[in-house]
Amino acid sequence: MKKKQIKESITDNEIRQLVVERLRGISSNKKVSIGSMGEFSKEEMIHNVQENSEIGKKIIEIQLEYIRALKEGLFFNEGQDANNPPQS
């Protein structure tokens, strides 16, 4: 039997909201340097993401790359799968 593939689409607005929620978890007294673009506070990053500015788009790109890396297990030990962690 052939399995049906269901493709779910996520809107740009939903992605922005996801990134905003992740940014809200950052400590308010920290600043993040984004290459040559400068240093940004949590509030500045949230504002830029919500406004979809060039800096906001870069922040979204960085966050999505991080989420993909987590999914692929790049932050785990070599040979360890994020979806199937080693059993104790």
Image (spheres, rainbow, N blue to C red):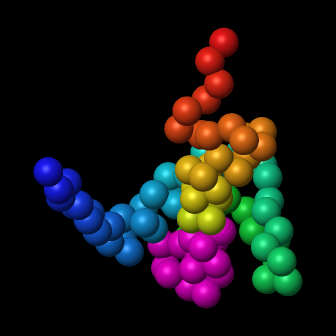
Residue 68 falls in which quadrant of the image? Answer: bottom right
Image x and y of residue 46, in percent: 57, 65
User: Which residue is located at x 64 percent, y 78 percent?
Assistant: 58
Dominant SS of magenta comes to: helix
Residue 79 falls in which quadrant of the image? Answer: top right
Image height of 18 relative to 34, above or below? above
Evaluate whether residue 10 shows in this view: yes
Evaluate whether residue 28 shows in this view: no
Which residue is at the far front?
A: 1
User: Which residue is located at x 61 percent, y 45 percent?
Assistant: 25
Is 18 displayed left or right of 80 in the figure? Answer: left
Q: Nearer the viewer, residue 53 or 82?
A: 82
Q: Is residue 37 magenta?
A: no
Image x and y of residue 19, in percent: 52, 60
Q: Where the C terminus falls, by quadrant?
A: top right
Image x and y of residue 47, in percent: 56, 71
Residues in magenta, as a range: 49-63
Q: Is residue 60 magenta?
A: yes
Which residue is at the far left?
A: 1
